[in-house]
Image (cartoon, helix red, strand yellow):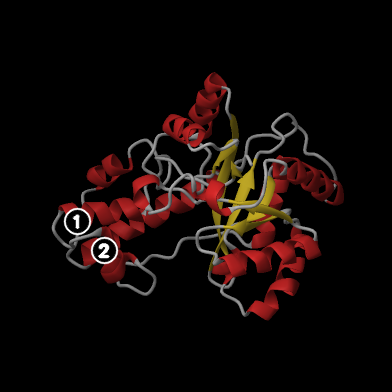
Amino acid sequence: MRNIDFHCHSTFSDGTLEPYQLVAAAASAGLAGLALTDHDTVEGAGPFLEAARRKGFLALAGTELSLEYKGITHLLGLDVAPESSRPLDLGFLQKCRAERNESLHRALESLGRPVDRQRVAELAGEGQTGKPHFALAMVERGYVSSRQEAFELYLGLGRPAYVRKRRLSPPEALGLMLGAGWCPVLAHPVTLRIPIEEYPETLKRWKGWGLVGLEVYHPDHHPLLSAFFRELADRIGLVPTCGSDFHGANKEVPLTWVRDNSTLTAAVLDRLREGLRAALSRDGGVPAA
């Protein structure tokens, strides 16, 4: 059985492999295809798609947006029909991220734990600057012994240097994706952190807003939970997907995870395209190029 992994990250957000390295790794892992879903950016899509084209490998541009919904919820956007889509404009989110990062610097300075702006940018490399890079800079300065400790003591939710970032609501994010002709998929729905009995009505509401897919198979889901989400997706009319949420050395999940844990085949891609067409039809049609 050949699988497509619809969720992974590169050095353009918080992964440790370059986009071209992801293509080689995915092919070696026996995957039929891979989607690059870096946080709040599509900057890595160009080199990713070019590397895949040279290798003859199926690759999808994508992104992962953080939304404001009962805390923080993540939404994947997948360019499953590039012939009829247009570029996804994430400029607003980039501005919000830059403002959050500057506030983070000021918060650490007020705590007597300053980190050099240039060094944080160097740690981010060509990708986006985020809290993991602040954490690494704090380790280098000797403030903490590990990135985990940096989050536990300073950067995590409720900690003294935590800075809230402006996030889109689900209707805003779904409208943004559908407006560009990209396919929206709710990532690791377990992180909604709602009672199990509330999932059916909640997901029906999201489908009404334009949701197309549901990430059923994910490392955060116990097999019984995956079975629950699979049945729920089928009942509500959402397309079930699978994703390793691969981050390279930043997360202990191999790129073979989907191959070893998902029962979905590459035919899911066709279902996502069909679901996207249906959502766009309800939403007024395919956007103009």
Q: Nearer the viewer, residue 243 or 115?
A: 243
Q: On screen, 131 above or below 43?
A: below
For the view shown, which residue lies furthest in the left direction? Answer: 142
Residue 274 in which image quadrant: top right
Say which residue label 2 marks.
150
The dot on residue 3 is none
Q: Residues within 10 Å of mark 1 (few under 14, many from 20)?
A: some
Q: Secondary structure at mark 1?
A: helix
The residue type indicated by label 1 comes to: Val
Q: Residues within 10 Å of mark 2 (few under 14, many from 20)?
A: many
The residue type indicated by label 2 comes to: Ala
Q: On screen, 75 above or below 6?
A: below
Quadrant containing the N terminus in the rendered view: top right
Name the residue: 46% across, 61% down: 165
Name the residue: 24% across, 42% down: 118
Q: Nearer the viewer, residue 139 or 189?
A: 189
Earlier residue among tags 2 and 1: 1
Say which residue label 1 marks.
139
Quadrant containing the C terminus in the rendered view: top right
| Left-right relation of 114 to 185 | left
Q: Nearer the viewer, residue 84 or 271?
A: 271
Name the residue: 26% across, 63% down: 150
Let me know if residue 92 appears in the view. no
